[in-house]
Amino acid sequence: MVAARRNPGNDSALIERELESLLGRDAVLPGSASEYLADATESRSLRGSADAVALPSYADDVARVMRWCYEHDVPIVPRGGGTGFAGGAVPLGGGVVISLERLHSVTRFNPELWRIRLDAGVRTADLRRRARESGLYFPPDPGAAEQSQVGGNVATNAGGPHAFKYGVTGAWVTGLQAVVAPGELIEVGGPMRKDVAGYDLKSLLIGSEGTLGIITAAWLRLIPAPEAALPVAACYQTAREGCEAIKSVFADGLAVAALEYLDAGALRATRKAFPVPLPAAAAFMVIADADGSAQEVARLHAELTELLGDGALSIHAPRDARAAAELWRWRDGTSLGVTAQRGGKVSEDIVVPLDRLVDAIAATVEIGQRHRLPACSWGHAGDGNLHSTFMISPEDPDALRRAEDAAEELFELACELGGSISGEHGVGWVKRGALEHQWAPAAVGLHEAIKDAFDPKGLLNPGKKVARRSR
């Protein structure tokens, strides 16, 4: 792969003028536009720099910009809602940010066939509302739904609590439109539900984080909306007791939609906002969600209440939609509650086999202690997906350095336990090189060969999703 490079003859003013000639003056911003230079990693002091920001309105505009950039050796950083936790949308080392926010049309909607085609800039919450208005459901529920965009969700293969039952974003994509180097618009897949022709280019683009191409539109499948959904939240005195309760949900064959957990530190940071008082001794919480028909939910909710209640310190089992929504709003605020403890955090989304979840929870706290940092975790227990977190003050650069070192230990831990360095946030910039811990050299080589085939100049989101640091 040729390293991304800047043509010495190109400066920011020239790049802006060239882009304005392609898109019009109102579709180009200076590279100093601060809202396009960071994502959710900003508390980790990750902020980039760009030569210009392009705001195309159509896929053809994206292709024109990429064609110009590829011809002039200018790096390209695609951007969705900027809600990522891996620095994937941060321009590091200049270049052109291509924001997809103006590609926000629903181009086809066939509710009778449970499918929709929409542009990459449509926000997650708008997609879910549009589906609900027709009695349909798009299950993937990554955080920041009012800001995150469909293209970014596809590019990172985003997950969320209900991925336990329904799978991550990629499981719902049947077709993609994308711009690939040196500026060609392609379509792979489409409205059909089955397609096994050729290599699976669609799946290569899903989760590629803008390093293989820029997703401009997607065909998504939908399902009829569940008639009802009710959660159950149970508190335990220890993480081991809570993890045994999680295993019992599997053992009893209870088909829950979500299976979440919070450890002692996460619970301590958020307990005051919980809808009902919690026992003082509570040091672990399990949340399970039952959805389906009203009859199915009533049965499963009762079974969960009994099963999780066995050995629990307390159990909260809402029986109406308002109380259920209140519980999920509280769960959605966990990250903010933890961040508020010190003002900042370094949080990674490692994955381990379910039977090693309790080990990973304990190891997260132990790693934090070794680096003199308060640590906690919460996440998607059913998927073995931890948000292992080290709390820091943004004004303390030494604490940030220690937290970054602790994160490297987390990646090694995940691999030692038979897991993965990422479950839903991607690799981006902050995990560059960590994939080397997880894969054999031959697999790493294939990863790099795919990048070289799609992006021979190395201009597409350079430095992101890199498998080994030596690259």
Image (cartoon, rainbow, N blue to C red):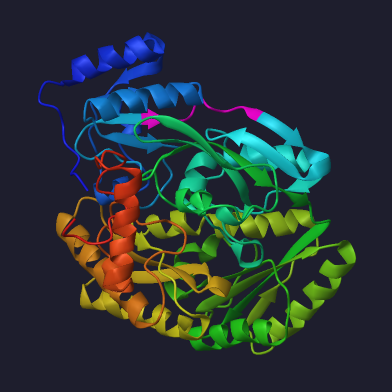
| Residue furthest left as drawn | 8
Residue 24 visible somewhere in the drawing:
yes
| Residue 29, percent from left and from top | 33, 19
| Residue 3, percent from left and from top | 18, 44
Horizontal side of residue 299 vs 287, given as left or right: right
Residue 373 visible somewhere in the drawing:
no
The quarter of the displayed image where residue 361 is located: bottom left
| Residue 382, percent from left and from top | 58, 74
Q: Is residue 99 magenta?
A: yes
Vertical order, 444 against 116 (above or below): below
How many dots with numbers?
Answer: 0
Horizontal side of residue 272 vs 275, given as left or right: left
Part of the protein shown in magenta: 98-106
Dominant SS of magenta comes to loop
| Residue 454, percent from left and from top | 35, 45
| Residue furthest right as drawn | 295
Residue at 30% of width from left, 23% of height from top? 68
Residue at 41% of width from left, 85% of height from top? 359
Which of the image's four quarters has the C terminus? Answer: bottom left
Residue at 86% of width from left, 62% of height from top? 293
Horizontal side of residue 348 vs 178, given as left or right: left
The quarter of the displayed image where residue 214 is located: top left
Foreground pick, 431 / 39: 431
Foreground pick, 251 / 198: 198
Q: Is residue 179 magenta?
A: no
Foreground pick, 416 / 161: 416
Residue at 36% of width from left, 67% of height from top? 421
